[in-house]
Amino acid sequence: MSKQNLQVVQKSQQPDVALVITTLGAPRLAPYRAFFGCSTDEQLLGAYFWGQAIGGAFLPTLGMYEVALRNAIHCAASRYSSKKASDCHPWYDYTRNDSVRIIGKTRDKVTNVLYTGQPQLRCAPEPSPDAVVASLSFGFWPSVLEGLAKPEQTRILTDAFPYHPHTSPKHWGVQANVGILISKLKLIQDLRNAVAHHEPIWKAHRLLGTEKHWSQSVQSLRAKHADILEVMAWCCPPSAAALEQSYATRMFKSICSTNAVRAFMADPFGAGAMALFEPDLAVVTQPTPISPPIAALESK
C-alpha cells in the first residue's frame, strides 16, 4: 500500500475514540489517565497505544537474551558435568551420577520434559540435551543457578559469564555476589513475564519505584534495556553488540523516548503511520547490492 493510500484509509476509517475508551474500560485506563496526565480521550488512547508499543519493542531483545543466556548456562553446565568432555551433556538429568544439583520446582520442570506423565516411564526416544534446553521455561534458568551446590556454582557461573568484570571461582564463591547476579536475572524475568501478559511495564513498581512522571519511566525502561544487553555481553559480547546495532534496538530507542510518548498522545493514530516496506514478491536469483545504512533514528 502506498503512503498516499495509507493516509486516505487512515482518515476514512478513524474510529470513534470515545467508544474505544468505553470498550477498554475505566479500571484499565485509570492508571494511564493519572500517570500520563491525560486531559482528553485522544491523549488517553495515545498513552495506551504507547504502552502497547513499548511492551512490543522489548520482545526481540528479550527473545535473543533468553536464547543467549540459556545456551551459555547449558554449555557451562555440560562442561562441568562431563568434566570438559562435552558442550552438550545431560547435566540436568538427576538420575545420572554426573548431574548437577536440581531441586524443588526446578526438578519438577525437568521431570515434565523427561517423563511421559506416568511414574517411572521415560519418554522414548529420549529428548536430546538441546531439545530439553529448548523446552525449559524462561524462569528455569535463574532458579537452576540459584539451586546449584556451591562448588558447581563457582565453576558454572565462571564459565557461563566469562566476560563479567569480576568473574572467577573466588568471586562467585561469595554468596552476596551470586545473589546480585540472580536478582538481576530475576528482574529481567519479571519484565519478560509482564510483557508477555500485556501488563503496563511503565508502572513504578515494575521499575525503581521512585518514578513520579512518565518521563522518568522512559529513562528507567531504557536502563532495563541496557541491563539486558549487559548480561548478554557477560555471556557473549558479539551477540550483545549485534543486538545493540540491530533494527530491534533502533526501534526500541525510538519508541522508548519522550518524543514518542508526546507523539502518541498528540495523535494516537498518526503516531503509528510509519513508512512501510513495499511488498516485493519477485524471486531473487542474484545477490542484491546493499546500499549504505540510513542514519539511526534520533531519540531524546
Image (cartoon, rainbow, N blue to C red):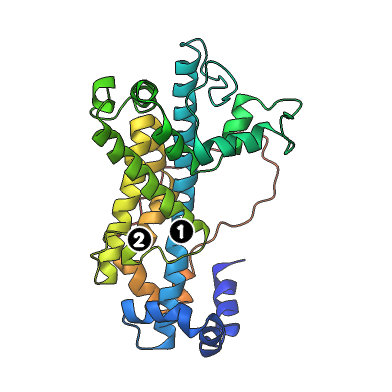
Q: Nearer the viewer, residue 149 or 197?
A: 149
Image point (46%, 81%), residue name:
27
Image point (29%, 64%), residue name:
217
Where disc 1 sits, the SS reads helix
Q: Is residue 215 left or right of residue 86?
A: left
Label 1 sits on residue: 194
Numbered label tally: 2
Relative image position of residue 2 (x, y in whole percent) = 59, 67
Q: Nearer the viewer, residue 175 or 90?
A: 175
What residue type is disc 1 on? Ala
Image: 207 above or below 139? below
Does any portion of residue 164 appear in the rendered image? yes
Label 2 sits on residue: 206
Q: Is residue 18 left or right of residue 151?
A: right
Quadrant, the C terminus:
bottom left
Image point (72%, 39%), residue name:
117
Residue 285 location, quadrant = top right
Relative image position of residue 145 (x, y in whole percent) = 41, 33
Image: 76 above or below 45? above
